[in-house]
Amino acid sequence: MLVNQVEKYIERHGLLKKGDKILVGVSGGADSVALFHVLWSLRKKYSWSLAIVHINHSLRGPEAERDAEYVRKLAARFSVPYYLRQVDVPSFARVNKLSVEEAARDLRYQTLEALADSLKADKIALAHNANDQVETVILFLLRGTGKTGLSGMPPRRDCVVRPMLSSWRDQIEDYVSQQGLAFRTDSSNLKTLFLRNKIRLKLLPLLAKQYNQGIYRHLYNLSLLEHQEDRFLGKEVAKAAKQCVELKAGQTVLNIRKLLGYEDWLQHRLVQAIGDFPFIQVENILELAVKKGRAREIYLPGGMFARNEYGNLIFSRRETSHPGLQVKLLTKFYPKPTGFTINKRKDRAFVDADRVKEPLTVRTRQNGDRFQPFGLSGTKKLKDYLIEQKIPSRQRDLVPVVVDGQGILWLAGLGRIADRVKITAKTKNILEIRILKETK
């Protein structure tokens, strides 16, 4: 039975603990409805506290609203707290130059993590299953991947857990049928507009029919083996990083002599670990490491650059400026150190680097500017906020406003960042932003 299978998977991978407060992502589809019901069935045994969140991506109009209403009724039926969140995927994709799939994923995880933080939830449970895992492996292969990509989705990453990752879709559909659970069908999943849908609806059935009926099981087993190997290799990378990677003045410094002394695969993994760079960029960085003479600096995705300097590869962020303000931004990127504490200063900000959406620029205020100050609920008009802070009207147009792809990120000089980029216990990487006066 599905309940027993999921329970064993949870125990084997240590996904949930007794007494956990679990935020369950429920789209209304068969997978997420089954996941919620399985966890609800086990809640008394493990003293779990459950809550449901449904995210409307602003992509399917009235159909999405009907999904949200179904999930609301499901939560009410089982007397579980229900949270509805709506995000504007089309606008986010356009502003950040992302595909709809990428934008939906980014916003979904940001929303889930923000809600989990506010509720003090221990885990976020998602309903990815074995079929999804197989599709993910194929997706990574088509986009170009190394061993990490072949491992697909992990059972757990930080507070996100996937208790049904070993369960197949037909098992899940049998379960909801046996339990008499209704569910919604997302019509967009039946269209081949998105690559994942093409893989699920066309490529995998073709491979199974014409090449190997066991393709699903084989690819799933491959992901299990690669996940185990990747965990081991990750430990080796961590050991090597202690020998050749350090932080200096907020920059990541990689010792070239020690780097080149390792095997090729370890060189690759060490560089990739610094910025999660794509394959071609890793190759370019390794070429930079052995480069002689001039032109010993390259630009990288995400506003970063690397330079070969005095036997080290130095990774940092590019500067941006606003001529009208006669100031510039200096940004530094580094992994969050253990025991990190924020040194509050008005001339710099420390934010969660993974929540910043490039490009990062500085400007003056504009009509209609709004932002959510750190620690406050809801957004405010920037004009109102400056008045509340008793900033004289003649000085308001001189306040440097640092913005990213999502809007206002930091009011430089006032010591207030946007709540969406605050550093939390789950933060992995820090972006330090400094405001400097330009010299003429």
Image (cartoon, rainbow, N blue to C red):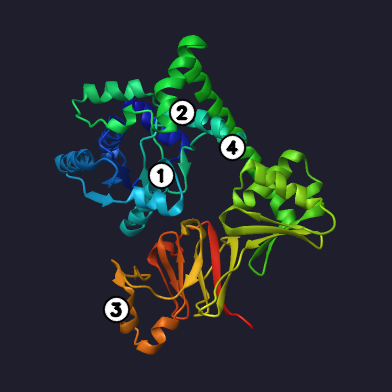
Q: Is residue 436 above or below residue 44?
A: below
Q: Residue furthest top?
A: 210
Q: Are marks 2 and 3 in contact (CB under 8 Å)?
A: no
Camera-side mark, 4 or 1: 1
Closer to the chain start, of discs 3 and 1, is 1
Residue named by callout 1: 105
The image position of residue 108, as x and y in percent, is 37, 47
- Label 4 amino acid? Thr
Residue named by callout 2: 135
Q: Quadrant of the N terminus?
A: top left
Q: Residues within 10 Å of mark 2 (few under 14, many from 20)?
A: many
Q: Is residue 221 above or below residue 436?
A: above
How many marks do you count on the picture? Answer: 4
- Label 2 amino acid? Glu
Tag shown at residue 384: 3
Q: Residues within 10 Å of mark 4 (few under 14, many from 20)?
A: some
Camera-side mark, 2 or 4: 2
Q: Residue at x 44, y 63 (%)?
A: 421
Alpha-carbon span between mark 3 and mark 1: 33 Å
Q: Are marks 2 and 4 in contact (CB under 8 Å)?
A: no
SS of the residue at dot 1? helix
The image position of residue 299, as x and y in percent, is 65, 56
Closer to the chain start, of discs 2 and 3, is 2
- Label 1 amino acid? Arg
Residue named by callout 4: 148
Closer to the chain start, of discs 4 and 1, is 1
SS of the residue at dot 3? helix
Closer to the chain start, of discs 3 and 4, is 4
Q: Residue at x 20, y 43 (%)?
A: 65
